[in-house]
Image (cartoon, rainbow, N blue to C red):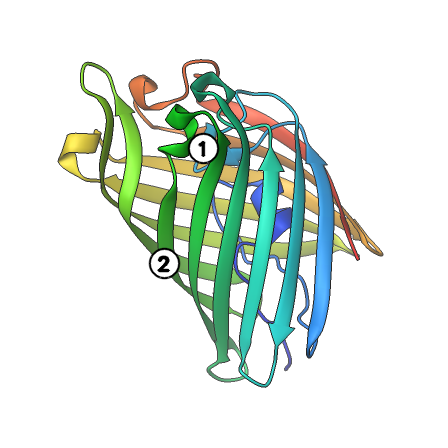
Amino acid sequence: MRHQKQTVRPLATAVATAAVTLGACWPAQAQSWQAAVAVASDKVLRGASQSQGRPVWLLDASRAFDDAGVTASAGLAGPVLQAQGGQAEASLAVSKPWQLDADWSLLASAAHYAYLGGARARAYRYQEAALQLGWRGQVTAGFSASPHTQVFVPGSGLLAGPACTVDLGLHQRLAGTLALDLGLGWRGLAPRLGRSFVYSSAGLSWRQGPLHLFLTTTDSRAPAAQLPAAAPERRRWVGSLAWQF
C-alpha cells in the first residue's frame, strides 16, 4: 500500500491546528516547486494564539529534491506577536522522509523561526529539530526539541532555555475528502521558564481540488502567565481556508 510522503510543518496543518502536528500533508513531487496561500481566523501554536486572537494570512513554498530525498521550505505569516511589536513570522525548514515499510514512515526535520518587527518580537526567534513517526498517513507520534526557547516570565522578563514537545495525532477520513483530525501534546519547559503543560485539538478538514478548509477547536493547559496577554483564552475555535498550487 502506498501512502503520502510527510513534509515538514505543512502550511495547512499549521493554519488549522498549529497545536499538534497531525500529519495531513501535501503530496511530494519529484524536483518540483509547490506553494500555498491561506487565511485563518487565528494562528495557534501548541494551544496558544500567536496573533492575539486576530485573523492572519500565511504563505508557504517548498521544493522536493527527490534525488537527495530532501524537501526545503520557506514560510511567512502575519500579523503575529503584535503585543510584542511583531509584524510577521518567517521560517526556513528542511526535512527528510524515510519509508520504513508499507505502513510505517519516519520524518526528520529542522527549522528556524524568526519574527519581523520590533526588538521585543525579534527576541522570540528560535530553532527546532523534530522526529515524527507515521503509520499509514493516519497516525503520527512526534518529538521536537528547541535549545533556545523564549518565554516571558512575570517578574523576570523574557528568559531563554531548552524546551521539548511530544505529540500524537490522528487523521481519519470520514466520507469523501471530509476527515476528522485529533491531536494531543505535552510541552516540556526548563524549570526557569515555567510549568510544563498539555494541549489538544479536534476538528474537521475538507478538500476540494486545490482548496482545503479546516475548522478546529484547540485547548491549552498552559499557566495563564505563559499565554499572550492580549489573548489569554485557553480554548479557541480556528477556521481557515488554504489554496495549494
Q: Residues within 10 Å of mark 2 (few under 14, many from 20)?
A: some
Mark 1: which amino acid? Gly
Residue shown at 48%/25% (left/top)?
81
Image quarter where the C terminus lies is: bottom right
Please say if 223 is above or below 105.
above
Task: Give how far across and how far down residue 122 sits, in percent.
Answer: 41, 33
Residue 231 rendering spot, x and y as whole percentages: 48, 17
| Dot in front, 2 or 1 | 2
Amino acid type indicated by mark 2: Ala
Q: Dot 1 corresponds to which residue? A: 47
* Residue found 64% across the figure and 62% down from its top: 62
Find residue 124 and report its image quarter.
top left
Which residue has dot 2 on it?
129
Q: Nearer the viewer, residue 22 or 232?
A: 232
Q: Is label 2 in a helix, a strand or a loop?
A: strand
Q: CA distance from mark 2 to mark 1?
A: 20 Å
Residue at 21% of width from left, 31% of height from top? 193
- Left or right: where 113 falls relative to 43: left
Does label 2 or label 1 sit earlier along the sequence?
Answer: 1
Q: Residue at x 25, y 42 (%)?
A: 188
* Secondary structure at numbered mark 1: loop
Q: Is residue 182 above or below residue 219?
A: below
Q: Residue furthest right?
A: 209
